[in-house]
Image (tube, helix red, strand yellow):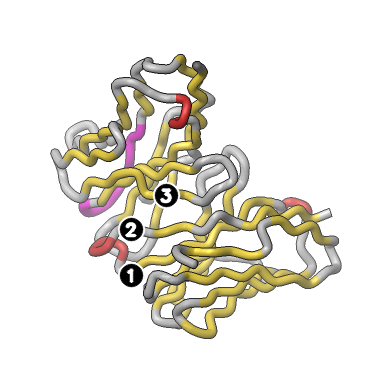
Amino acid sequence: ETGVTQTPRHLVMGMTNKKSLKCEQHLGHNAMYWYKQSAKKPLELMFVYNFKEQTENNSVPSRFSPECPNSSHLFLHLHTLQPEDSALYLCASSQEAALSTVGTQYFGPGTRLTVL
Amino acid sequence: GDSVTQMEGPVTLSEEAFLTINCTYTATGYPSLFWYVQYPGEGLQLLLKATKADDKGSNKGFEATYRKETTSFHLEKGSVQVSDSAVYFCALTTNTGNQFYFGTGTSLTVIP
């Protein structure tokens, strides 16, 4: 399998549930990202990992907890979410997190999350 | 702060029509500029990019020129096809950090 994969593709959860989103990249990249895509809003960068170290956390609520066990895998652990957290969550990877020098991110297909 | 503003959609065109999707940016430093495309049910894919002023990015018949004087990076295609129906995102990154800034996306529908 090539590129960036995400599972599950769709997830419906209640506000008291705990779930995890998974992202895997097969590109040999060293940086991985979580984005939130809501309707009529710009993509929101949530977290950046570079060589397994978190380098960015854009004021994301603690009910979202990322985990990067190695450069190929990225998780987003979810607990006690709110209905306004319903969105498409996109994972991306790039060669490294110095985007100005590389400049290209490869995106997965996303997980469509619905919080009831 | 750095940001990208792109024209609101949705845009509906007939096949073979000319396409322009406007994008303007605000950035400190010297940004690199990108257009990404998102087909239904898929993630974003890089369509084209330009890394310095006056560069022209091109791919699949789409073009965009990095205009520093007007801080713009408008996407154009001379003759759209039904298969071009997608959401198009303008984005930038600067040489000061590791942030990507995306526009809100413009939905394009091409009808036969």
- Looking at the picture, which amino acid does disc 2 mark? Thr
Are both tags, 3 and 2, on one chain? no
Q: Secondary structure at mark 1?
A: loop
Tag of residue A95 = 1
Q: CA distance from mark 1 to mark 3?
A: 15 Å
Name the residue furthest left: B54
Tag of residue B97 = none
Q: Chain of mark 1?
A: A
A77 drawn magenta: no
- Looking at the picture, which amino acid does disc 1 mark? Gln
Q: Measuring 28% from the left and 36% from the top, which residue is drawn there? A: B73
| Residue A86, percent from left and from top | 71, 52
Q: Secondary structure at mark 2?
A: loop
In the image, B31: left or right of A87? left
Q: Earlier in the sequence, mark 1 or mark 2?
A: 1
Q: CA distance from mark 3 to mark 2?
A: 10 Å
Name the residue furthest front: A1
Are both tags, 1 and 3, on one chain? no
| Residue B18, percent from left and from top | 34, 18
Q: CA distance from mark 1 to mark 2?
A: 8 Å
The residue labelled by disc 3 is: B45
The residue labelled by disc 2 is: A104
Residue B96, quarter of the rendered image:
bottom left
- Closer to the camera in the image, A32 or B78: B78
User: For mark 3, does the 10 Å Cα neighbourhood hold few (<14), some (14 to 19), or many (20 or more) residues?
Assistant: some
Q: Are marks 3 and 2 in contact (CB under 8 Å)?
A: no
Q: Measuring 22% from the left and 31% from the top, which residue is drawn there? A: B70
Range covered by the magenta-colored residues: B23-30
- Looking at the picture, which amino acid does disc 3 mark? Gln
